Image (tube, rainbow, N blue to C red):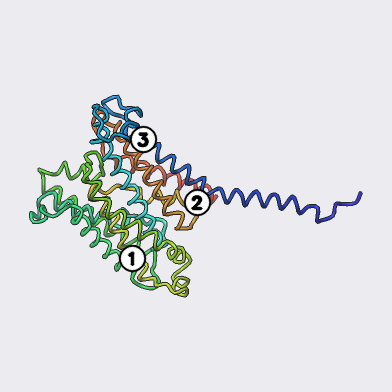
Amino acid sequence: MSSLPAHQHFPVNKVQTNKESVFSTLKTPLIFTLCTLALIASLLFSLIAFSQFPLSLSDIWPLIFNPSGDSLNQQIIVELRLPRTLVALLVGIAMSIAGLLMQGITRNPLASPSVFGVSAGAAFAFAFSATGLLPGLSHIPVIFITMTGALLAGVLVFFLGGLHQKNANPIRVILAGVALNYLCISMTRAAVIYADENAYGVMHWLIGSVSNSSIKDVYSMLPGTIFGVVIAILISHKLNLLRLGDEMLNSLGGNTQRLRMIASVATIVLIASAVSVAGPIGFIGLVVPHIARAIIGQDFRLLLPLCALLGATLMLISDSFSRIIRFPDDSPVGIITSAVGALFFLLLALRQVRTTR
């Protein structure tokens, strides 16, 4: 029996190729659609979940057409739950994008606001202000105090880690960030010890909490968050080039030092905006970029919006479940995010061990 001509096999391969191209074309919109639906579901869940009052979705829909609802449940949602939910959403966006930017400019997957000491610097500045050790700081808005602390920590890591040089060493950057992080943590604890009266409130804030958020906190976070997100979007293409190496970016007309400086400013503003309201929320900026890369790849133009969606969703879910630890009292959301982050990296480490065997 004679074999089939070779050209008769081509249509099968062509059909397979077309299926793969259609799947790759629909993959990205499908991912963003599912993540958007997850964000909407977590937002609605955050508005009504774990309340002492019987809140339900039927209390939310009338508020869309009449924000000044008369019922008690609707007033609780508008005045208490909505500001808390919006703050959690903004914090998730800010911390996840800040973590992605830090990992991008250092080309190090372990970079994050907490590891690099930027969050600890902002917390240190807040602790000295809130404990009254420096009375002159009590009249300054919190966001400016946390931004100053984050800026000082960021500048120190920037220069001590050698990010101002053409070929920055990722290991040196990590060492500088970890050292500064522990220095700021120890100084923050010292400030709390010397201020007994305000120690509990400061310690509660240092764990990370959005329980006492108000609409003023939302307005104070919005400018810095929008600024950082816009800057991140504008430099996303150059971050893709930087991922290929400093030489690649410089050869295509980019400036490595300028890019790292711009990204660092955006990162500091994002972190300061989040920390000024919610405290140093841990692991969001470290975990979310890893999850986003596993889902959609390495393109920063896609990673930025996906990190925003995943960070907001994770933060909303964590805040919702933080309410049941001591229900009906609230617990700091930082407890949940730290537990999730530790569990995530434990599973990641176990997976790496299995793949190396």
Where residue 320 appears, x then y in whole percent? 32, 35
Residue 44 bears which disc, if any?
Answer: 3
Q: Secondary structure at mark 1?
A: helix
Residue 211 or 218: which is nearer the viewer? Answer: 218
Left or right of 253? Residue 319 is: left
CB under 8 Å between discs 1 and 3: no
Q: Name the amino acid, label 1.
A: Ile
Q: Quadrant of residue 163?
A: bottom left
Q: On the image, numbered disc 1 is attached to which residue? A: 262
Dot 2 amino acid type: Ile
Q: Give the percent coordinates (x, y) of residue 27.
A: 55, 48
Sequence order check: which comes first, mark 2 or mark 3? 3
Q: Residue furthest front?
A: 65
Q: Which residue is mark 2?
A: 296
- Residue placed at 45% from the left, 50% from the top? 292
Q: In the rendered structure, find residue 169 and report the number of the disc placed on it.
A: none
Distance, label 2 to label 3, CA atoms, is: 26 Å
Expressed as whole percent of the image width and height from the top left, the position of residue 282 reads: 31, 47
